[in-house]
Image (cartoon, rainbow, N blue to C red):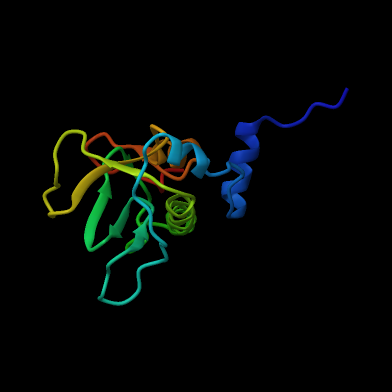
Amino acid sequence: MIKLPSARSLSALAVIAGFSLTLPLSSASGAASGDRETAAFARCVGPARVTCVVDGDTFWYRGLKIRIADINAPELGHPSCAYEARLAETATRRLTDLLNAGPFTLAVEGRETDRYGRALRVVLRAGRSLGEVLEREGLAEHWHGRRGDWCIA
């Protein structure tokens, strides 16, 4: 009998290679659950930001800057090491894919805004957190009130 690698080890290898094996949550299930928000997201470029993705945990939606409240993703703008830069790029692409995969809901859980004036929201599809998807794939960490270090060896 041939033993295949676990899904977890395949997911970790995929992240290192720059892609993800986890499929987006189904847009059909999102529509059935009452998710109503939807847009076409791309990477933010230039000063005019209406609906676009900044990095793995921040995006603009209809002119509102949103920080995903339940996760922390690697820094794209000022990474502390080459590994963080690569992971941030992958997390940004993955968040873009997840947001474009179908309707979603923006939920307030706790504070409404952070100290920078960004709206704090948990992004849900069919009741499941898209932040948790990024966490499972190794592209984000659960938010504990402060940023972690992505460059620890």
Asked which quadrant contains residue 35, the reply is top left
* Residue 111 screen position, x and y as percent: 14, 38
- The image quarter containing residue 2 is top right
In the rendered structure, the answer to whether residue 24 lies left or right of residue 106 reads right
Left or right: 52 with respect to 113?
Answer: right
Closer-to-camera residue (43/71): 43
Instruction: Inspect this view and state whether residue 25 appears.
Output: no
x, y percentage for residue 115? 11, 49
Residue drawn where x is 31% and y is 57% of the image: 59
| Residue 141 in view here | yes
Q: Nearer the viewer, residue 80 or 40?
A: 40
Q: Quadrant of the N terminus?
A: top right
Residue visible at 44% across and 41% down in the picture: 31
Q: Residue at x 38, y 45 (%)?
A: 104
The percent position of residue 14, horizontal first and vertical second, equals: 62, 47
Residue at the spot 26% in from the left edge and 61% down from the top edge? 62
Q: Camera-side residue: 80 or 29?
A: 29
Whether residue 34 is situated above or below residue 96 in the rendered picture:
above
Residue 34's place in the image compared with 58, above or below, is above
Left or right of residue 85, residue 143 in this image: left
| Residue extending farthest top | 1
Q: Residue furthest right?
A: 1
How many numbered marks are there?
Answer: 0
Q: Position of residue 11 (x, y in %)?
A: 60, 40
